[in-house]
Amino acid sequence: MLVLVLRSTTGYASRIVASNSRRPARQLRIIGGEWRGRRWQFPAGSDIRPTPDRVRETLFNWLAGRVAGARVLDLFAGSGALGLEAHSRGAAHVTFVERDAEAARSIGQVLRSFGSPRAEVRHDDALGFLAREASPYDIVFLDPPFDSDLLARAAAALEAGGWLAEAALVYLELPARTALPALPPAWQAAKSGRAGDVGYYLVTRAAGGRTARGAAEV
């Protein structure tokens, strides 16, 4: 059953846009899986920056064999592109966390129109969500607004809060010109790439590992 949870938030979530605001919609498509080729529209909010198709295709090639049956967290969901792609490819459950009320409602509407039984949408501040009782995830998509310092803070909260299952995989997205911030010592960058202004990494967890720097580009 699809669950859409809307809650009031504080702090940087105060920029939430009312659901009846008029913003032009943009369109994306599912690349692979059960919903391959299906398209959906999402509100063109000022800080919604969907992961490009090329990057999504590379990411899910990296994740081949790991998505089916996985519990997935799309923490800064935005358009929902990463979580929807994972759902299409057989994830057991996907939790979408998005602070923009209109964007959260849009993801819920897409899931209902696609006939999704395995998803939850939470209208919430990402760090506020991570401060709650944890439920471990196998795959986490971590793609905060580029003009924020949230990547390192969210990474630390994920690790410290018990949100990551054993051998979890974490996807990181940030400006290509920006170096990775300090990440939990157990995180190692297994893959990395660049597409235009976007830099992206697939990170694994390893006991006694090093910070996720110096990954080979693919």
Image (cartoon, rainbow, N blue to C red):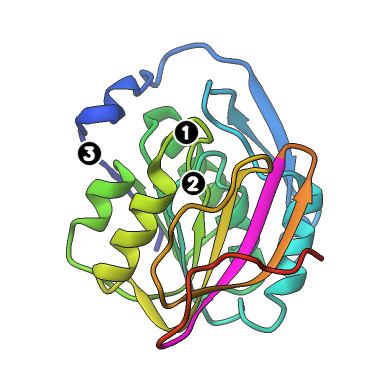
Q: Residue 103 carries which label?
A: 1
Closer to the eye: label 1 or 2? 2
Which quadrant does the N terminus fall into? bottom left
State the SS at label 2: loop
State the SS at label 3: loop
Label 1 close to label 2 by CB (< 8 Å) = yes
With respect to residue 167, does 213 lie above or below? above
Measured Cα–Cα span from mark 3 to mark 1: 13 Å
User: What residue is rendered at 40% in x and 73% in y?
Assistant: 185
Which residue does the numbered mark 3 point to in the structure image? 7
Measured Cα–Cα span from mark 1 to mark 2: 8 Å
Quarter where residue 184 is shown: bottom left
Q: Which of marks 2 and 3 is nearer the N terminus?
A: 3
Given the image, on which type of amino acid does mark 2 rest?
A: Ala
Q: What residue span does the magenta drawing correspond to?
A: 198-207
Measured Cα–Cα span from mark 2 to mark 3: 16 Å
138 or 29: which is nearer to us?
138
Q: Earlier in the sequence, mark 3 or mark 1?
A: 3
Q: Main secondary structure of the magenta part?
A: strand
Residue 201 among those drawn in magenta: yes
Q: In the rendered image, is residue 213 in sight? A: yes
User: What residue is rendered at 28% in x and 48% in y?
Assistant: 127
- Rate crowding at label 1 as few (under 14), some (14 to 19) or many (20 or more) other CA atoms within 10 Å: many
Which residue does the numbered mark 2 point to in the structure image? 77
Given the image, on which type of amino acid does mark 1 rest?
A: Ala
Q: Earlier in the sequence, mark 1 or mark 2?
A: 2
Task: Locate residue 83, reporting x and y percent.
Answer: 55, 57
Q: Tell whether 20 sits left or right of 27.
A: left
With respect to residue 182, does 176 lie above or below? above
